[in-house]
Image (tube, helix red, strand yellow):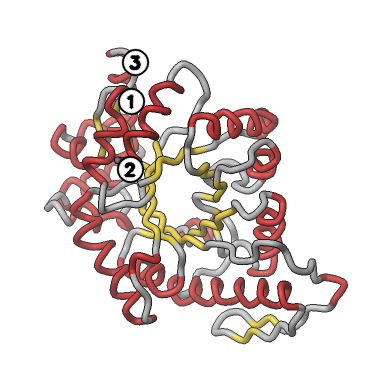
Amino acid sequence: MKLDAALEVDARRMNEAGRIARAAEAVGFAGLWTPEKQHNAFLPLVLAADHTAEIQLGTGVAIAFPRSPMVMAQIAWDLQAFSGGRFILGLGTQVKAHIERRYGMPWEAPVAKLRDYIQALRAIWHAWQTDGRLDYRGQFYNLTLMSPFFNPGPIADPEIPIYIAGVNEGLARLAGEVCDGFHVHPFHSVKYLNDVVRPQIAAGAAKAGRDPSQVVLASSVFLITGPDEASIAKTRAFAREQIAFYASTPTYRVVLACHGWEDTGEQLSRLAATRRWAEMGGLISDAMLDVFAVTAPLDRLGRVLRERYHGVLDRVCSYLPYTPGPLDDAWQQAVRDIAGP
């Protein structure tokens, strides 16, 4: 197993991305993942690549459908070249309401469209690497024009890994069929991983004649830990709030269904619909917290994560972004412990 970290900076602190990345590499984290929430997922990785030499750098995740495959292909190609082959392109579909009402884009058959999108990306990269003709004709995307003026040309490491994120069965099967990795949503449990995600990854891989072990399973984790009781209480409260937020979304109801907690999801949805946010965390019981979050003292973080996820996930990452500082010794120990003997 590998221990990764999250890199999250806002526009006012963008210049800190390089310093944070350099510290993360010194700790020994295997990779750094940037989310796309309030800010662009790609920009911090440029600075991270410039200040590091070995750590992998990826989007966890960038939203695919608001960008054409050509736009995404160009960004990824440049980051892969600039980082010396350390870039991982993590893609997500988002949900219908956000694609239509936040991005102003059409929502169409997300699994089929993402498959087409990935195949289009690889066709573009192949044309650039080989100086061949671009002639991709898919269900949603048709790309047939690539003049030399717009072709960036070959790079040293053209095989850019593509991970996708998902919660339900269709995207997990797609990952098994055509992807290098799958970003499991942080709102998950080991039972959900074993009963839903891994079988669907295997089904998709079997369809494509692949070994499911070729698909890396990665996820961020709600960690309840800290150097003192106040810090632990703070992370516990935060985990309750985040779990309640995700559990209120019908898209994620499959995770609750694994444990027979659909009624709680429905209650949370009603609270969210009436904007009663402050009440939602109270519906997350201690039993649910134990299932959806990991509680461990700082000196046992790596061992507890390994005990829970060994043989289930390949890469894990704290849901909270990494901040260099006094916890670095604990993170270094966690990196060693999670790697195992």
Residue position for label 2 = 272
Q: What residue lies at 85% left-to-right and 76% top-to-bottom?
A: 148
Q: Indicate the secondary structure of the residue bearing disc 1.
A: helix
Q: What residue lies at 71% left-to-right and 72% top-to-bottom?
A: 129
Amino acid on which disc 3 is placed: Pro
Say if 95 sits above or below 249 in the image.
Answer: below
Q: Indicate the secondary structure of the residue bearing disc 2.
A: helix
Residue position for label 1 = 235
Give the image quarter of residue 121. Answer: bottom right
**Mark 3 vs 2, N-terminal side:** 3
Give the image quarter of residue 155. Answer: bottom right
Within-10-Å neighbours for mark 1: few <14, some 14–19, many 20+: some
CA–CA distance in space, label 1 to label 2: 22 Å
**Mark 1 vs 2, N-terminal side:** 1
Residue position for label 3 = 227
Amino acid on which disc 2 is placed: Ala
Image quarter (top left, top right, bottom left or bottom right) of the C terminus: top left
CA–CA distance in space, label 1 to label 3: 11 Å
**Left or right for 216, reference 7:** left
Within-10-Å neighbours for mark 2: few <14, some 14–19, many 20+: some
Q: Nearer the viewer, mark 3 or mark 2?
A: 3
Give the image quarter of residue 106. Answer: bottom right
Q: What residue lies at 30% left-to-right and 56% top-to-bottom?
A: 250
Q: Nearer the viewer, residue 2 or 229?
A: 2
Residue 233 position in % (x across, y down): 28, 19
